[in-house]
């Protein structure tokens, strides 16, 4: 990877050449990543190798017209072609693309926490094979098959603009995710991530997935069929399930663009109590247990922002362009240039935890209760009330009289997440939830969320109904 000095030199040269091309203002993002990945499929190592990418993203502004272009050719001719394409695009961007307001000046912000670990970036192929083989050997001990992915890598990112911003950061990341299966009914998931490979808790990852799998193997399947078109159950949601809901709630409801366009459940309701008093939600890029980022994709410094305090809506998120349009201030939540039409999204969420363990939540469940470890295929039905639908996955269990009685078929939910967060009765200890495969790249983002117990969540379908 390029050094910080090399990145600064490249960015400064590109900005100077853009000005020579007759452009009034410009923004340039350099983003380089390097990843080592190894996978297993049903206990067999199926793929391992190193990949690396380095790209320049250029925004050219003349008056109030803009043009954007991207290249992975960082030679002199490649950069000249990039400038030519960006300038030719000026005035031809789609009408929904926001006019960029370039923030600054910001210079070489130093993160308050360490983000880069050489040992994480330089983990060898042999070390990756050894660790992934441990997952296979562990699964065989319990007559299970393991499909896993181990990733280690790092990135360097630099941003420069004609308003005086010049910021560069480097980061590393390691993650292990696995699914344990058998020939019949078992599907159990777990994952862990860390900036430091030495803190990647593989033993806890094994333990979590194995306990889930053993429950499914040892207990009889409960033929749970819904009564009528819908049925309501108390639920215990594991951190992976909670993160799915909280991240969707944030991207739709706490996005400043959606708020201003009155497409958010928060629109016109700031400083009102919208969630339960036990819900405190922050965006905190320097939270101790999360993944860290010192600035957003415009170079604006990141800082903690309170989104909900004791259920009261406190803030939504803006990038520079949206903030300028609606006479607000950027909160440091700009997306990459090619995603800015989506608005501003918090990507370092922290949901304040409590003292209840999952075991205590289970023991407190006198009424029939569902324990959900994970969701997938989650989609927004109505953004104005944050109504979501999706399916349970990788272990859903029925609880009766304080004990798990067995796994059930996957269920489809239909629930307003703000309404559900008014019915939270117990909260556990938060942990980091992050899976880079789900987000398409290596970037230090993730949610630190606890397990939750929630009353009366609506379910509208079960695969058991289809099978009957």
Image: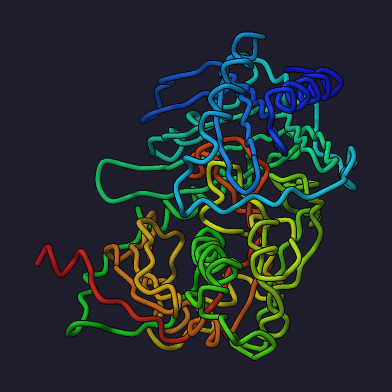
Q: Is residue 451 above or below residue 365?
A: above
Image point (53%, 41%), residue name: 338
Give residue 135's position: percent from left, percent from top.
52, 32
Q: Is residue 390 left or right of residue 222?
A: right
Q: Position of residue 288 (x, y in %)?
A: 81, 55
Task: Please tell me which residue is depicted at 76% across the width and 32% down the height of the picture.
Answer: 158
Residue that lies at the very extreme toward the left in this rendered image = 468
Residue 426 drawn above or below residue 110: below
Instruction: Specify whether residue 377 is in view.
Output: yes
Q: Position of residue 292 (x, y in %)?
A: 76, 47
Q: Is residue 198 visible?
A: no
Foreground of the two, 31 or 429: 31
Quadrant containing the N terminus in the rendered view: top right
Quarter assignment of residue 422: bottom right
Q: Is residue 111 left or right of residue 378?
A: right
How is this picture coloured? rainbow
Q: Nearer the viewer, residue 288 or 165?
A: 165
Residue at the image point whose x is 51% and y is 44% from the top: 439
Question: Foreground residue, 458 or 14?
Answer: 14
Dividing the image into 4 quarters, which one contains the C terminus? bottom left
Instruction: Quadrant for residue 279, please give it.
Output: bottom right
- For image coordinates 70% across by 75% down, the residue present is 315
Residue 322 place in picture, x, y as percent:
63, 62
């Amino acid at each position: 990877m390029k050094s910080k000095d090399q990145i600064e030199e490249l960015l400064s040269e590109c900005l100077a050449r853009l000005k020579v091309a007759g452009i009034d203002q410009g923004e340039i993002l350099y983003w380089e990543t390097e990843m080592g990945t190894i996978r297993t499929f049903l206990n067999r190592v199926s793929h391992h190798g190193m990949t690396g990418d380095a790209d320049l993203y250029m925004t050219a502004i003349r008056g109030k017209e803009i043009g954007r272009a991207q290249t992975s050719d960082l030679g002199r001719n490649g950069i000249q072609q990039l400038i030519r394409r960006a300038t030719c695009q000026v005035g031809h961007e789609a009408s929904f693309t926001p006019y960029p307001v370039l923030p600054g000046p910001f210079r070489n912000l130093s993160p308050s926490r360490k983000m880069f670990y050489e040992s994480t970036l330089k983990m060898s192929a042999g070390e990756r094979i050894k660790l992934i083989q441990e997952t296979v050997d562990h699964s065989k001990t319990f007559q299970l098959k393991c499909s896993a992915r181990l990733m280690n890598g790092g990135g360097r990112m630099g941003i420069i603009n004609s308003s005086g911003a010049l910021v560069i950061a480097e980061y590393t990341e390691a993650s292990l995710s696995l699914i344990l299966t058998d020939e019949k009914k078992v599907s159990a998931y777990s994952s862990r991530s860390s900036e430091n490979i030495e803190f990647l808790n593989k033993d806890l990852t094994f333990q979590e997935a194995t306990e889930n799998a053993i429950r499914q193997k040892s207990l009889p399947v409960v033929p749970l069929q819904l009564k009528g078109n819908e049925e309501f159950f108390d639920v215990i949601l594991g951190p992976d399930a909670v993160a799915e809901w909280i991240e969707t709630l944030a991207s739709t409801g706490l996005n400043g663009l959606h708020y201003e366009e009155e497409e958010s459940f928060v629109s016109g309701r700031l400083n009102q109590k919208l969630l339960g008093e036990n819900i405190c939600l922050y965006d905190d890029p320097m939270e101790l247990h999360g993944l860290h980022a010192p600035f957003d994709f415009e170079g604006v410094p990141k800082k903690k922002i309170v989104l909900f305090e004791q259920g009261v809506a406190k803030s939504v998120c803006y990038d520079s362009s949206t903030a300028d349009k609606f006479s607000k201030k950027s909160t440091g939540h700009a997306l990459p240039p090619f995603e800015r039409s989506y608005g501003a999204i918090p990507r370092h969420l922290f949901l304040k935890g409590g003292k209840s363990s999952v075991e205590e939540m289970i023991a407190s469940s006198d009424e029939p209760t569902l324990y959900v470890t994970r969701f997938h295929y989650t989609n927004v039905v109505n953004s104005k009330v944050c109504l979501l639908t999706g399916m349970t996955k990788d272990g859903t269990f029925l609880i009766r009289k304080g004990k798990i009685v067995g796994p059930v078929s996957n269920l489809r939910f239909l629930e307003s997440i703000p309404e559900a967060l008014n019915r939270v009765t117990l909260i556990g200890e938060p942990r980091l939830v992050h899976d880079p495969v789900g987000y398409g790249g290596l970037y230090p983002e993730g949610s630190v969320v606890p397990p939750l117990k929630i009353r009366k969540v609506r379910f509208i379908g079960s695969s058991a109904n289809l099978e009957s």
